Amino acid sequence: EAGVTQSPTHLIKTRGQQATLRCSPISGHTSVYWYQQALGLGLQFLLWYDEGEERNRGNFPPRFSGRQFPNYSSELNVNALELEDSALYLCASSTGSGTEAFFGQGTRLTVV
Amino acid sequence: KNEVEQSPQNLTAQEGEFITINCSYSVGISALHWLQQHPGGGIVSLFMLSSGKKKHGRLIATINIQEKHSSLHITASHPRDSAVYICAVSGFGNEKLTFGTGTRLTIIP
């Protein structure tokens, strides 16, 4: 069974541009979570999608947004990129509330 | 003060040693997770527990809800166990995970 897959694995963007990161959850999982791990910092919760709806959001500016599609895959969009947005972005999926989450390998975003 | 505290931050041990990593949290939780992050960033979920003890191979995780404390033990440690181990907690009706800062474990052959 395929795990959580994220694309691309690496992404280089220029300050001010927009980045789009993609996540495909494990088959049967309806919840998708996004996390940011900036260099030297711990993991920070970004967004939680369940059944196509945004359920919770971390302490990030509105430049960070996303959506979940009918097939439960998800996109994370980061607008007006800043140098500090350079980080590893991890996606996780689960079958829903209170169940174990499984992580993808991440997308490393570099803003230059 | 962080909601989730881990200790130690760094741990170096000889192959074969018994390893203990501790996690304390200050909020009510529905579950506690132990994660393993290898160089390159990939994260593997090791355990999710809300009470008692779980064992998987050489890994054992325990949690004491009253004391708001969990431990991850590795028996007969091996160099391939070298990784960052992260404790995370999830709240009631709130699926976001709050993470500890991680423990970097290095096992020397």
Image (tube, coloured by chain):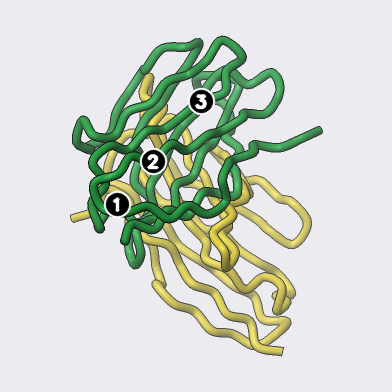
Label for residue A19?
2
Q: Are marks 2 and 3 in contact (CB under 8 Å)?
A: no
* Element type where label 1 sits in the image: helix
Locate residue A26: give its quadrant: top right
Q: Nearer the viewer, residue A27 or A65?
A: A65
Q: Nearer the viewer, residue A109 or B70?
A: A109
Q: Is residue A54 above or below residue A81?
A: above
Residue A59 x, y percent position in the rendering? 22, 37
What type is the residue that disc 3 sits on?
Ser
- Dots 3 and 1 on the same chain: yes
Q: Nearer the viewer, residue B56 or B94?
A: B94
> The disc numbered 1 marks a residue on which chain?
A
What type is the residue that disc 1 sits on?
Asp
Look at the image and tell me in which quarter the N terminus of chain A lies.
Answer: top right
> The disc numbered 3 marks a residue on which chain?
A
Residue that badge 1 annotates: A85
- Between circles 2 and 3, the one closer to the viewer is 2
- Dots 2 and 3 on the same chain: yes
Q: If you read the primary sequence from the N terminus, does the residue marked by circle 2 or circle 3 appear first?
A: 2
Residue that badge 3 annotates: A74
Q: Is residue A99 above or below residue B62?
A: above
Q: If you read the primary sequence from the N terminus, does the residue marked by circle 3 or circle 1 appear first?
A: 3
Residue A34 appears anywhere in the view: yes
> The disc numbered 2 marks a residue on which chain?
A
Residue at 26% over, 46% down: A81
Q: Which chain is yellow?
A: B
Residue at 41% over, 26% down: A48
Measure the alpha-carbon separation of dots 2 and 3.
14 Å
What type is the residue that disc 2 sits on?
Ala
- Dots 1 and 2 on the same chain: yes
Q: If you read the primary sequence from the N terminus, does the residue marked by circle 1 or circle 2 appear first?
A: 2
